[in-house]
Amino acid sequence: MLTGDDLIRKSALAIAAAVLLLFTGCGNDSTPAVSDSVKAKANISGEPQSISEFAMDTYMTVTVYDGETETALEKAQEEIKRLEKLWSVTDEESEVYKLDHAAGETVTVSSETAELIAFAQEMFSKTDGSLDISLYPIVAEWGFTTGEYKIPDNETITALLKNTDCSKITVDGCDVTLPAGMSIDLGSLGKGVTGDRLSQVLKDNGVTSALLDLGGNIQAVGSKPDGSDWKIGLKSPFGKDNIAKLEVSDKCVITSGGYERYFVGEDGETYWHILDPKTGRPARNGIISATIIGSEGRLCDALSTSMFVMGEEKAVELWRSMGGFDMILITDDGRLIMTEGLKDSLTMYDQYSYIKTEVISDKA
Ligand code: ADP
Ligand code: MG
């Protein structure tokens, strides 16, 4: 239970988080950031309140701007902890840990874990194998799980690749069987699903306006309390600021970027944490940042990782064939490609006006 003191402390934290979010949300564009945050506050009965929790290797912050708050925030915090316990790769009690250590045996898991694995398999097939939750041992070999980075030799990667390909996992109701030698991690879509779950928990508990920042994945619940869109900053892969702002309501904005987790090898090359399942090496297909905007966090998270891996041409093709979401790709030759639905909601910041922007339509 939250005590009164807790709430005071949490609301101080919330204001700091809210101001930070609205500032980061508007990058270096000095005008709208401050005035919007003031307007937002003026339109609600109390101050925004938030909770923060470290889970899935990142800080997750939930800020409620309008509606019933106390129970909703408590439940949201419980939900983050519950999902972390379910899908952690290191917690021996977690379902993913049990699957990863089952040595070919069948494990009965919760329906939500089974469904998520089945969904990951569906995305593996839709993305021509670009999203593969069974890459975990290779991600670990590169040191991305521990921060002890190294460049694995060819033989090691070739040997590890033999135990990948998540289409070989059997999901039969809640019974899941990984081939012996395979292990999975849900890092490429877990934060997205968490966003969906948290939005639901908040809405079920009377929240009408909230922002979730799940390690840079933004999920907006409703609109701002005054009914206008949230302004979300799109991080620049070229610097520490934002390249553009996006205006959205009731949607998530999920980015996969090569600049998020990487190291520079002794050879001077940059190696990042998103791997190409076909090579077991950092995906280098011309994209340095892929952002998906849509209503389902699970799908957007899976797609942001996949589009990064697939490269521009295949990504655009997949967008045209699937539809139902918007996309921003930033390429290593300095272009920003956006789908047509974003034409009126994306504004580039002045200092990035040199970036060539292209709008993609749903017809080739
Ligand atoms: P982040 O979690 O950093 O926001 P992503 O959603 O793109 O970014 O997920 C990247 C994580 O997923 C990596 O840290 C790694 O654990 C795992 N991963 C890397 N490449 C792939 C891939 N091709 N398919 C599935 N998971 C991947
Ligand atoms: Mg992802």
Image: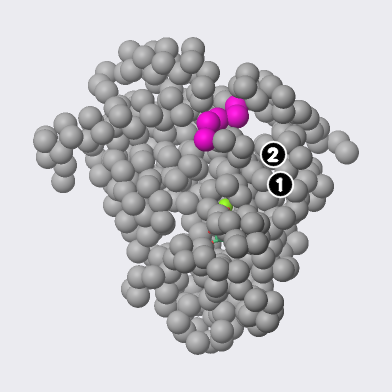
Q: Is residue 15 left or right of residue 267?
A: left
> Residue, x 34% and y 32% (percent of image)?
17
The colour style of the image is: one colour
Q: Is residue 235 above or below residue 170?
A: above
Q: Callout 1, which amino acid?
A: Ile
Decide which of tag 2 and tag 1 comes sooner along the chain: 1
Identify the secondary structure beneath mark 1: strand
Q: Within 8 Å: ligand 1 and the Cβ of disc 2?
A: no
Q: CA distance from mark 2 to mark 1?
A: 6 Å
* Residue numbers of the magenta segment: 240-244
Is residue 293 something that shows in the picture? no
Q: Nearer the viewer, residue 348 or 5?
A: 348
> Residue, x 50% and y 43% (percent of image)?
217
The residue indicated by pointer 2 is: 330
The residue indicated by pointer 1 is: 287
Q: Callout 2, which amino acid?
A: Ile
> Residue, x 27% and y 18% (percent of image)?
45
